[in-house]
Amino acid sequence: MKEDALYQLALGSIPGIGPVYARRLLHRFGEARSVFHAPEAALADVLGKKSKRAYDIAHFKAFSAVEKEQAFLDRYSIRSFFLTDQHYPQRLLRCPDAPILLFFKGHTDLNASRIISIIGTRSPSDYGKQATEKLVKDMTSLPGTLIISGLAYGIDAISHQAALKYHLPTVGVLGHGLDQIYPREHASLAREMLKTGGLLTKFGTATRPDAYNFPIRNRIVAGISDAVIVTETRPRGGSMLTVENALAYHRKVFAIPGRITDERSSGCNVLIREGKARLLTGAAQLMEEMNWQKPSPTPGVGQASLFPTAKEGSGLSDEEWSLLQLFREKKALSISDIHAQGRQSAGLLAITLLNLELLGHISSLPGKMYRLCE
């Protein structure tokens, strides 16, 4: 298992191997170890005939650096979640740009029954602070709720603090490695979060909190959740980008309205006016619109055995659901059979097939065949 983890870390360290190429490689070779043992010509078939990426994998020599990274993870009890791991956040897995690797330190389930991300301005008003805390407090009536935010100043920190105050697990998604905390003023808050929640990042050690990392962090905040709630924000900034990510991932977006004269609420009001977010007045409304009155099973690989008969509540994307229906009709299909349906592009189809296989709905057979798992 440790050797597998080293190969996974190594694959994540190859320049230019992002989520799309990683999924294609795993789809072709099965696991990270096999990727590194594949001939360069076979790698080039997947990555491109003149691709430097294939050369970098075939001639990879930096295993000493990978071992050093693994030693750090072991020393500080940090778990790494690879795309194929059963504990990888399943909501995030269904996003086409889900990170190859995630690093998590903490004690909570990243596949909790209900996950909400709360985001907003770094300089909230008293109204924003009170609205955020009340929302989190009222969510305590619904067991199995996990609060996600970005550990930044303002609404992020207030969300985490309120979750701790009212005994809800909360996870901070970071824009840097787990060998540091940014901002430093939140170090004590982060330590408290580790007791019942945790810290999550896609970045390895020595990754500084540079500005270009935070849009990546925001995509994780959006993708890992069932719903994104904006408490206060201006019309431009990180919160609005996170909303765009959430909409692209087909997540529900809610915004708490504010006074028309308050610049800090202007972004929320714009989102509501443009129909990008639903006006949110409280946790009771959130529960109703998310259909959370009754406990639901925790999504994850185990849920695949329930074999959902309706898309609502299945956790599958439109593409995954459509392809799953085709497998239910035909039971077994070849790649050429699926292509003949003309439902998805080749790149998207590879990702969709891999996700359905990882979730236990289908299994691969020799000869580029796939069958339905009853």
Image (tube, rainbow, N blue to C red):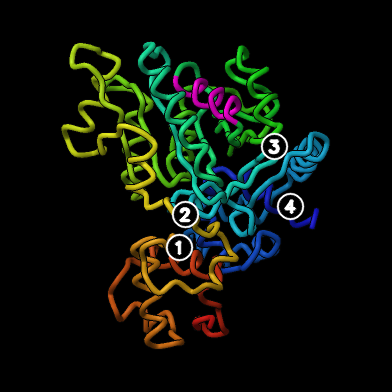
Q: Which residue is mark 4?
A: 5
CB under 8 Å between callouts 1 and 2?
yes
Q: Earlier in the sequence, mark 4 or mark 3?
A: 4
Residue type at the position of mark 4: Ala
Residue type, numbered disc 1: Ile
**Amino acid at dot 3:** Lys
Dot 2 or dot 4, earlier in sequence = 4
Q: CA distance from mark 2 to mark 4?
A: 20 Å
Q: Percent position (x, y) of residue 13?
A: 63, 43
Are there few (<14), some (14-19), or many (20+) residues within 10 Å of tag 2?
some
Mark 3 to mark 2 CA distance (whole Å): 26 Å
Q: CA distance from mark 1 to mark 2?
A: 8 Å
> If you read the primary sequence from the N terminus, does the residue marked by circle 1 or circle 3 appear first?
3
Residue at numbered disc 2: 20
What residue do we see at 64% from left, 61% from top?
35
- Identified at 42% across, 17% down, the residue is 129
Looking at the picture, how far across and down is residue 53, in whole percent? 55, 51
Left or right, 58 with respect to 248, comes to right
| Element type at mark 1 | helix
Q: Which residues are magenta?
A: 155-166
